[in-house]
Image (cartoon, rainbow, N blue to C red):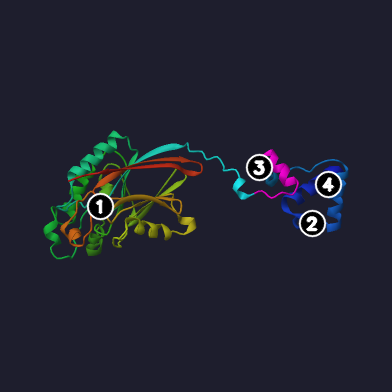
Amino acid sequence: MFTQKERIEEIVSYALKHGDDVAMDTYNLSHETLSRYKRRLKELGDDPKVPEVLKTIQERYSKKELEAIAKGAKISTNTLRIPNVNFDGDCITIGLFGDTHIGSIYFNEKVLDKAFAEFEHEGVDFLIHTGDVCDGLSNRAGHVYELSEIGFHSQREKAVELLSRWEGKIYFIDGNHDRWFAKANQALIVDDVAKLIPDGVFLGHDEGNLYMNGIKITVWHGEDGNSYATSYRLQKIAEAFTGGEKPNILFCGHTHKQGYFMERNIHIVSAGSIQTQSKWMRSKRLAAHVGFWIIKAWINKDGVSKFQPTWYPFYA
């Protein structure tokens, strides 16, 4: 059973925390009765329990600032304490590569072997491929003459042979070149490759998600064109995510460009390419950034606390 004093303490504390109107409605009190309880508690010489909001204020301001507030002074928002951020966390190391275009005469096997060797040397936990695993076969005039492997089965076998050299997990999405086979005869080449190599995982068509330790990684390819500024395309992709669907990390392929920046609190990396510049790209005045990434990400309860991407350029 509550004593009268305990009952008054409970009601006044509740009013301080939630507001007078809520307290009056909850306890079915009139404004006059609530005011009387406040006066009565003051007469008894006891303070109500400090609500959480007051505890937060006590933690945020110094003793002198609290004394100034009590005297009616205004405290500038510039004096607010910056909260401590914990930069510790579990570190994962990701090998990122994309646009290999296996089957193209411009695919560079040396870059892929170098990437795998460096991934192993740096002890990466897994690899992510951002699409256009194979070069496919388009209706573009002359494309067939740019192929070292012609047709679905030939490119699939070559991709399985090369990607099986990596002894570990590889996550894939497909790209627009891969999907030329799907458009022609419903053949899903990247899904097949992921199933045929020892530890491959197919995440989806053009876009896929990977969830890990409470964070979301989105892998994106796209069928749009290059932008004048490398960062502009990445910025527009980041803007396309609604608030509840934003990833913590976004890896992008397709344009054969490398770059990193942060937008909307998303760590965004453009993967570059393993394929060197083709004659078609040069005719469109499109450069190819040939190389790969090794990315270290520290993850704690608040998300990605540190992000360290390293680009490995390859000079032909």
Left or right: 73 as drawn, with respect to 132: right
Q: For residue 205: magenta? A: no
Say which amino acid is labelled 2. Answer: Met
Q: CA distance from mark 1 to mark 3?
A: 53 Å
Q: Element type at marker 1?
A: loop
Viewer-proximal residue among 71 and 203: 71
The residue lying at 76 percent from left, 42 percent from top is 49
Residues at marks 4 and 1 touching, judged by CB atoms closer than 8 Å = no
Q: Residues within 10 Å of mark 2 (few under 14, many from 20)?
A: some
Residues at marks 2 and 1 touching, judged by CB atoms closer than 8 Å = no
**Lower sequence index among marks 2 and 3:** 2
- Residue at the disc numbered 3: 61
**Residue 67 image-quadrant placement:** top right
Residues at marks 2 and 4 touching, judged by CB atoms closer than 8 Å = no
Front label number (2 vs 3)? 3
**Lower sequence index among marks 1 and 3:** 3
**Image position of 23 with respect to 295: above or below:** below
Q: CA distance from mark 2 to mark 4?
A: 13 Å
Q: CA distance from mark 4 to mark 3?
A: 29 Å
**Lower sequence index among marks 2 and 4:** 4
Residue 2 visible (yes or no): no
- Residue at the disc numbered 4: 8
Front label number (1 vs 3)? 3
Q: CA distance from mark 2 to mark 3?
A: 31 Å
- Residue at the disc numbered 1: 99
Q: CA distance from mark 2 to mark 1?
A: 65 Å
Q: Which residues are magenta?
A: 61-75
Q: Element type at marker 4?
A: helix
Say which amino acid is labelled 4. Answer: Ile
